[in-house]
Image: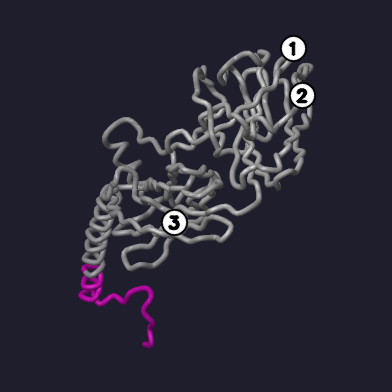
């Protein structure tokens, strides 16, 4: 696919950051749309019909105007870069030029996609935008202001190469020593094929003696890797997800004991391995990598040692006191209350 050089793109403040990750309706000022991502398939020469829902979230009637733009991968974050094509998906789509919505009104808007008979097999990616300003046909570049829309990821059936795989898997910043969970992981996945790839799988965590202790979804957001790009994914291992946002309180002593309690609730100690197993493509090609890390919860271990010392010291004192009691009673010739008297 050949794209025209982007001449001007005014910043899309809220719109599509993370749109490849989520499936919730998004909100920008007056308008929310659902879904925000649509994955569909079609054949060359086929007409596809789909739809999206627009909702006016203001207390006034508002007119919204449609526009289209192709997108491609921007860096390794998964964020899209919007461009205008000569003849690709953004030129194959059609919908209402404008719609007017009353306060709180929702409307299902149909979208038609006419795939050319000579369309190239593989992935084609575009967005349907809605904004409060009319689209200017005379503009020579894709201009995006306060707009929101839906990403459309179209796969055209045919002979498509599927190639790619893991480039890297490690803890973030290559960190090895941890004193508490979570342990954060990062992997980079490359797509050398002709269509999007959605790597799916888990990271299996094993302890020092290689016994599996947990498993983590490696692509919970179901993010895609676009053709000819590399994407970076991140995920965390945490025993108790509710404790993910733990913030130690003020004060050295309070921090120490709260951290120890947090480590107890998310117990992990010793050398661990994390093996990432992913599959991708229609052939479910498998790829895997392993990384290692060490968890040493020293605050919890110090508290445990202190508790054991107290128990040992206290138990030893109680035992000595009990022995003295027994000896004293024996010397006085008095039977203990629980002794049987056989006379």
Tell me if residue 301 is in the magenta stretch. Answer: no
Query: What is the x, y in percent for residue 179?
Result: 29, 47
Q: Is residue 342 magenta?
A: yes
- Quadrant of the drawing holding the N terminus: top right
Which residue is denoted by mark 2 in the rendering? 96
Question: Quick one: SS at disc 1?
Answer: loop
The residue at 62%/34% (across/down) is 88
The residue to which callout 1 is attached is 60
Within 10 angstroms of label 2, few (less than 14), some, or many (20 or more) residues? few
Q: Quick check: 130 left or right of 311?
A: right
Q: Nearer the N terminus, badge 1 or badge 3?
A: 1
Q: Quote the CA–CA distance across marks 1 and 3.
A: 49 Å
Mark 3 or mark 2, whichever is nearer to me: 2
Mark 1 to mark 2: distance in Å? 21 Å
Of the image marks 3 and 2, the number of the one nearer the N terminus: 2
Q: Secondary structure at mark 3?
A: strand
Q: Secondary structure at mark 2?
A: loop
> In this rendering, is residue 326 above or below 186?
below
Q: Which residue is mark 3?
A: 203
User: Residue visible at 49% across and 36% down?
Assistant: 73
Q: Which residues are magenta?
A: 324-343
Task: Say which quarter of the image contains residue 39.
Answer: top right
Q: Position of residue 324 (x, y in %)?
A: 21, 68
Q: Distance from label 3 to label 2 (Cα)? A: 45 Å
User: Which residue is nearer to you in this view: 213 or 337?
Assistant: 213
Image quadrant where one finds the C terminus:
bottom left
- Which disc is residue 304 wearing? none
Dot 1 or dot 2, earlier in sequence: 1
Q: Residues within 10 Å of mark 1 (few under 14, many from 20)?
A: few
């Amino acid at each position: 696919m050949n794209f025209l050089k982007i001449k001007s793109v005014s910043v899309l403040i809220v719109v599509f950051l993370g749109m490849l990750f989520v499936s919730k309706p998004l909100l920008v000022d007056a308008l929310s749309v659902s879904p925000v991502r649509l994955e569909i398939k079609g054949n060359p020469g086929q007409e596809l019909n789909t739809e999206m829902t627009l909702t006016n979230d203001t207390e006034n009637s508002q007119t919204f105007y449609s526009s289209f733009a192709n997108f491609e991968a921007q860096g390794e974050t998964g964020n899209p870069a919007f461009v205008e094509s000569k003849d690709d998906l953004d030129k194959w789509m059609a919908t209402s030029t404008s719609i007017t919505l009353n306060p709180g009104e929702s409307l299902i808007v149909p979208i038609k996609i006419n795939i050319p008979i000579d369309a190239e097999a593989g992935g084609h990616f575009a967005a349907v935008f809605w904004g409060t300003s009319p689209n200017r046909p005379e503009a020579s570049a894709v201009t995006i202001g306060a707009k929101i829309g839906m990403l459309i990821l179209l796969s055209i059936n045919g002979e498509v190469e599927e190639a790619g795989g893991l480039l890297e898997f490690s803890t973030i910043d290559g960190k090895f020593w941890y004193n508490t969970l979570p342990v954060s992981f990062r992997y980079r996945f490359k797509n050398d094929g002709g269509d999007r790839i959605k790597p799916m799988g888990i990271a299996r965590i094993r302890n020092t003696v290689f016994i599996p202790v947990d498993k983590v979804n490696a692509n919970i957001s179901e993010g895609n890797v676009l053709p000819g790009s590399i994407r970076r994914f991140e995920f965390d291992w945490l025993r108790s997800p509710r404790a993910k946002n733990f913030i130690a309180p003020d004060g050295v002593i309070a921090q120490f004991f709260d951290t120890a309690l947090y480590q107890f609730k998310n117990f992990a100690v010793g050398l661990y391995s994390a093996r990432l197993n992913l599959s991708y493509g229609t052939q479910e090609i498998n790829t895997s990598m392993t990384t290692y890390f060490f968890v040493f919860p020293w605050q919890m271990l110090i508290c445990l040692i202190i508790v054991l010392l107290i128990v040992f010291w206290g138990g030893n004192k109680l035992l000595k006191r009990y022995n003295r009691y027994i000896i004293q009673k024996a010397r006085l010739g008095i039977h203990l209350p629980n002794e049987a008297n056989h006379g």
